[in-house]
Image (spheres, rainbow, N blue to C red):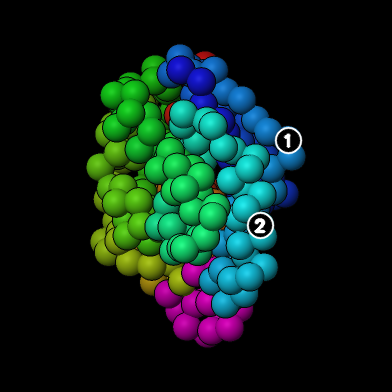
Amino acid sequence: MIVQLFVPCFIDQLYPQVAFDTIKVLEKAGCTVKYNAQQTCCGQPAFNAGFWGESKDVCTKFVQDLEGADYIVSPSASCAGFVRNNYGKLFENNAFQSPAKKVASRIYELSEFLVKILNITDLGASFEGKATYHDSCAGLRECHIKDEPRQLLAAVKGLELVEMQETDACCGFGGSFAVKFDTISVSMADQKIDNTINTEASYLISTDMSCLMHIDGRMKHNGQNVKVLHLSEVLASGY
């Protein structure tokens, strides 16, 4: 199966290893991965800030860069959810609506693609350690992902997965929300961190590096040492 990889901006700039591990996982699952080096942003930041015109320009490029792919896979529920749920609205009554909708219908977050499309839950990964899992808002509420990452993690040899309290509570990032409402954002992150620490896990795993970046920054500020890992980093371990 041939898939197009979409790498979110912050992963490209800050966490490139997540993109490389995503390729490893997809290839392990039997996929041929293609990457259009001309791709940029999915358009979400401008859209969420209310700049729909500017966002549409970026989204148009996204569609052109990834048009024709049978499947588009991204290591980000946030980006996948945005494309899936907003491109139809953004290009409503527009000549570009049809190709935009087609692209939106073909994009998947990594775990849902593996489980729902490829019917794979065991990638032969091995990772020693105790971990807990954070459900991102985008994963739960935009992509409706909950069981898929857990099914994949349950098959990882050596990994002990323990559930935290209020795993579906927001971590407080929310893009510009963390900047505009920093006091509230920090309080939400601290609550998420308390629930993480209470599990006595050494690792915190999620499908979204944006959440993990926010939580990790706050933990480092507090002097706490739980290591954050994207799901792909765990699934790529051991081979």
In front: label 1 or label 2: 2
Q: Do callouts 1 and 2 mark residues in contact (Cβ within 8 Å)?
A: no
Position in image of residue 239 (x %, y %): 52, 16
Q: Is residue 169 visible?
A: yes
Give the left or right position of residue 94, taking residue 151 as reference: right
Q: Pick whichever, 98 or 22, lies toward us.
A: 98
Q: Give the quarter of the image for residue 123.
A: top left
Q: Residue at x 39, y 17 (%)?
A: 124
- Give above or below for 170 relative to 234: below
Position in image of residue 23 (x %, y %): 57, 27
Q: Is residue 200 visible?
A: no
Q: Residue at x 50, y 35 (%)?
A: 72
Q: Residue at x 46, y 17 (%)?
A: 1
- Give above or below for 53 relative to 122: below
Q: Pick whichever, 38 or 141, lies toward us.
A: 38
Which range of residues does the magenta coloring cover? 173-189
Instruction: Name the residue type under label 1.
Output: Ala
Secondary structure type for disc 2:
helix
Label number found at residue 75:
none
Residue identified by numbered label 1: 37
Neighbourhood count class around disc 1 (C-alpha, 10 Å): few under 14, some 14–19, many 20 upward: few
Give the left or right position of residue 11, taking residue 228 as reference: right
Instruction: Name the residue type under label 2.
Output: Val
Residue identified by numbered label 2: 58
Neighbourhood count class around disc 2 (C-alpha, 10 Å): few under 14, some 14–19, many 20 upward: some
Q: Residue at x 30, y 38 (%)?
A: 148
First in sequence: mark 1 vs mark 2:
1
The secondary structure making up most of the magenta span is: helix
Position in image of residue 26 (x %, y %): 49, 24
